[in-house]
Image (cartoon, rainbow, N blue to C red):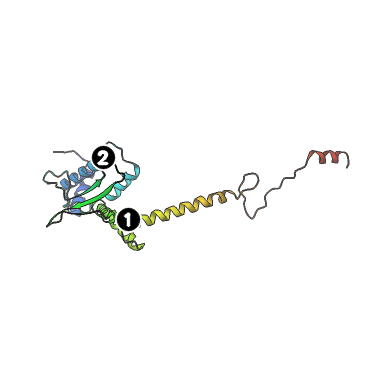
Amino acid sequence: MMQTKVSTETYDAMKRIERRQGISIYSIIQNTCDCIRRYMEDKTKLSPMVEKAMNMLEHMIGWKDNFNVADPDAEPEISEATYYLNDKNGKKGIRVVHVERPFFGEWKQTMNLQQILERFMCLTFPSLYRRLRFMAVCRQCSSILELLIDIVGELERDEDKRDLQAPFEDAQRSDYGKAIEYGRRTRRKKHQDMDSLFDKEDGR
């Protein structure tokens, strides 16, 4: 049993959420414990990017009847698994296989990387997956893997373009290192050598 006291304002707010979402405070606390354990139990501290992703993806939708490991009445069982295969004889490389148990019949497996990635994203990050699928349709990509390759290629082209432009962008300077302001004349300095100065003094 885990119990704590909260302020009156917090209690009233939780009751409003309970009524609006149709989810009990008991379930909210269980899901919160489940979320914190999954993201913070590891020894490695969360990076700001992961913390931001966690805050965006963890929400109230679907919490009413979802499965979580903090529920004492839950009975966890493995329904799917992804395995990483290597060669015992030392050959390099990894092969991935995803194994799934259907409702009826025998276990089935796939080594199709597109299907494995789609399944992982769909089950692990459902909200993000829906957004990625929408982006894939907009870009006429047939899969999440194709979408990621498309986005990476686009960013790499932009980065290459910036690298090519950088030397020319910095070349728009006068001889004294200051950026040239077009529309304004740069100040010219008159250079004279020592011989010409002596000639002037001699009247020549």
Q: Position of residue 120 (x, y in %)?
A: 25, 52
* Circle 1 residues within 10 Å: few <14, some 14–19, many ≥20: some
Q: Which residue is mark 2?
A: 40
Q: Residue at x 71, y 47 (%)?
A: 188
Residue located at (34% from left, 45% from top): 49
Query: Quadrant of the image for the C terminus?
Result: top right
Residue 59 shows in the view: no
Where residue 35 sits: x, y (%)?
23, 44
| Residue 98 visible (yes or no) | yes
The three-letter code of the residue at mark 2 reads Met
Residue 72 is situated, as x and y percent measured from the top left of the image, at 12, 43
Q: Indicate which disc, 2 or 1, sits on the residue closer to the N terminus.
A: 2
> Total label count?
2
Residue position for label 1: 145
Query: Relative to the observer, which residue lies in front, 182 or 204?
Result: 204
Which numbered disc covers residue 125? none
Quadrant location, the N terminus: top left
Picture quarter containing residue 148?
bottom left
Mark 2 or 1: the one toward you: 1
Residue nearest the observer in this picture, 148 or 40: 148
Question: Mark 2 falls on what kind of element?
Answer: helix
> Label 1 is placed on what type of residue?
Leu
Where 29 sits versus 127, above or below?
above
Q: Position of residue 139 (x, y in %)?
A: 36, 62
Residue at coordinates 19% horizontally, 44% vertically from top-left?
29
Query: Element at badge 1?
Result: helix
